[in-house]
């Protein structure tokens, strides 16, 4: 049997009961999917879609409570004719075993049967789970004995395993460099583009993902910080309110929080390629021998936003919604229907607190997008780093291959210490990139320690 399976869950039982087609917002794809596996799937290219169709599939309702017990509507089958567009993934569902409604002794009993944590059973999402489906099928048959004959028949038949392993990450790597000269030559070799702005980001480990800190996941695919996003920002504001008094917009606050180290939906990028090269080399000593990476983003000039953009206000204020409110967002709705929804009203309330004239005409497509934003140079770190940001909307994911309006290429970086020495000669070092007294002291200590150890 396959070593993976699809687990698709909906809060609305009508999306499960008797349906022959399922549709899932792209923002809910691959939650609770191991990170390494999700990295190869999130682009949803033909190879990824073909792989998903090889997997056995559980189509379930979210767990419901009743008199101390728990119930779920469960169907088992396979997917066919999967199609992916910018907003959602749609697939045909071909049932093999119709379990119907299953009553579990408790929610814990349900999580034990599905080998999942309790949060997963309450989430509308599409996961690709590791492991075989067989043990789950047997556990479900124990809880609903009428289904046991069909489970035995299915497990007794010869199972077809995937014809290929899961897709691997696809990166557009244009060069591998070991000095500043080679880096600049690689950049100069890029084909020119008219009416495009270029930004850069450095990763000290080439395996790092293009994911803002608040949207990062644990290795099993569960969220680290997203369920607490609104509380994180409010707690920091409560503790250090005076630091944020000059910030006019929610985006301004997010920028300041980002540079204080709080997880946000911002991803730092720079207009200066040498700053990005510095970040690809500078970091933990244990990573010095691991290849780093500089990511190059090409963004059409017309799609670059500024700090006071209405779209920026909409995406930034998503951070003020609770996790439960975010889960109510349905980006598949048309504009009018979306703006009539309760959660849109709550988001509008936050937006109007900074833009009282804002009208309720939010575009769901924009709310699920990733936009490039130039920030005010009010923060001491932003000025030397030529700061700009990628601002992630609701459920937004950035495939390694890029997306429409955001072209991505990469340069692998080796010989990090040698490059840091070259950059230091160009006055690009921790002192100039991080203009604070503690970073200057650390840089000076490191410089003179290495000088004394050199024969």
Image: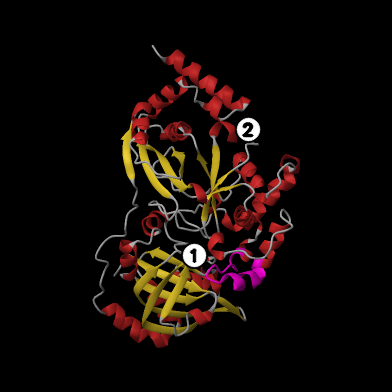
| Image coordinates for residue 346, horizontal then vertical, percent | 69, 64
> Which numbered tag is attached to residue 232?
none
For the record, the magenta segment spans: 326-344
> Which numbered tag is attached to residue 380?
2
To which quarter of the image does residue 94 belong?
A: bottom left
Q: Is residue 19 magenta?
A: no
Whether residue 7 is visible, yes or no, is yes
| Image coordinates for residue 350, horizontal then vertical, percent | 70, 58
Identified at 37% across, 83% down, the residue is 97
Q: Residues within 10 Å of mark 1 (few under 14, many from 20)?
A: many
Q: How is the image coloured?
A: secondary structure
| Image coordinates for residue 109, horizontal then vertical, percent | 51, 73
Q: Is residue 453 left or right of residue 323?
A: left
Observer-nearest residue: 145 or 118?
Answer: 118
| Image coordinates for residue 210, horizontal then vertical, percent | 46, 48
Q: Residues within 10 Å of mark 2 (few under 14, many from 20)?
A: some
In the image, residue 217 above or below residue 164:
above
Secondary element under disc 2, as helix, strand or loop, is: loop
The C terminus sits in image quarter: top left
Disc 2 and disc 1: Cα gap in Å?
36 Å
The N terminus sits in image quarter: bottom left
Reading the image, the residue beneath label 1 is: 28
Identified at 51% across, 52% down, the residue is 216
Secondary element under disc 1, as helix, strand or loop, is: helix
Whether residue 341 is visible, yes or no, is no
**CB-based contact (under 8 Å), mark 2 and mark 1:** no
To which quarter of the image does residue 43 belong?
A: bottom left
In the image, residue 266 above or below residue 2:
above
In terms of sequence position, does the residue under pointer 2 or pointer 1 come before the other? Answer: 1
Observer-nearest residue: 385 or 288?
Answer: 385
Count how many numbered circles sit on residues in the image.
2
């Amino acid at each position: 049997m396959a070593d993976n399976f699809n687990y698709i869950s909906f809060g609305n039982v009508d999306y499960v009961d008797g349906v022959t087609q399922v549709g899932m917002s792209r923002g809910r794809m691959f939650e609770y999917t191991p990170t390494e596996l999700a990295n190869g799937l999130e682009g949803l290219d033909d190879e990824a879609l073909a792989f998903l169709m090889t997997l056995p599939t559980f189509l379930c309702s979210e767990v419901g409570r009743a008199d101390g017990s728990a119930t779920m509507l469960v169907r088992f089958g396979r997917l066919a004719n999967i199609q992916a567009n910018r907003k959602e993934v749609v697939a045909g569902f071909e049932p093999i075993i119709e379990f119907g409604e299953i009553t579990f002794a408790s929610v814990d009993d349900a999580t034990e049967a599905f080998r999942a944590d309790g949060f997963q059973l309450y989430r509308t999402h599409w996961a690709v789970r590791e492991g075989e489906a067989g043990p789950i099928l047997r556990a479900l048959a124990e809880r609903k004995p009428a289904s046991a004959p069909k489970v035995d028949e299915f497990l007794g038949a010869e199972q077809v395993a995937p014809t290929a392993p899961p897709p691997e990450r696809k990166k557009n790597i244009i060069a591998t460099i070991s000095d500043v000269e080679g880096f600049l030559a690689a950049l100069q070799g890029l084909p020119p583009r008219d009416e495009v702005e270029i930004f850069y980001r450095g990763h000290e480990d080439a395996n790092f993902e293009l994911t803002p800190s608040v949207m990062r996941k644990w290795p099993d695919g569960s969220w680290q910080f997203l369920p607490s996003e609104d509380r994180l920002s409010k707690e920091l504001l409560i503790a250090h309110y005076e630091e944020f008094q000059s910030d006019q917009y929610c985006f301004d606050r997010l920028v300041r929080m980002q540079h204080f180290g709080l997880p946000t939906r911002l991803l730092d990028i720079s207009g200066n390629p040498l700053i990005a090269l510095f970040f690809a080399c500078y970091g933990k000593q244990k990573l010095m021998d691991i290849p780093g990476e500089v990511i190059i983003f090409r963004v059409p000039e017309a799609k670059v936003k500024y700090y006071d953009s209405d779209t920026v206000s909409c995406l930034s204020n998503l951070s003020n919604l609770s996790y439960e409110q975010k889960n109510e967002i349905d980006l598949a709705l048309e504009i009018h229907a979306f703006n009539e929804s309760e959660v849109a009203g709550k988001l509008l309330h936050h937006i109007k607190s900074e833009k009282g004239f804002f009208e309720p005409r939010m575009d769901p497509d924009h709310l699920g997008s990733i936009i490039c934003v130039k920030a005010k140079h009010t923060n001491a770190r932003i000025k030397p780093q030529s700061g700009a940001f990628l601002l992630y909307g609701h459920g937004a994911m950035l495939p390694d291959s890029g997306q429409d309006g955001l072209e991505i290429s990469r340069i692998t970086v080796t010989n990090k210490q040698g490059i840091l020495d070259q950059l230091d000669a160009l006055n690009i070092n921790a002192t100039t990139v991080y203009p604070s007294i503690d970073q200057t002291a650390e840089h000076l200590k490191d410089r003179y320690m290495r000088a004394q150890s050199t024969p």
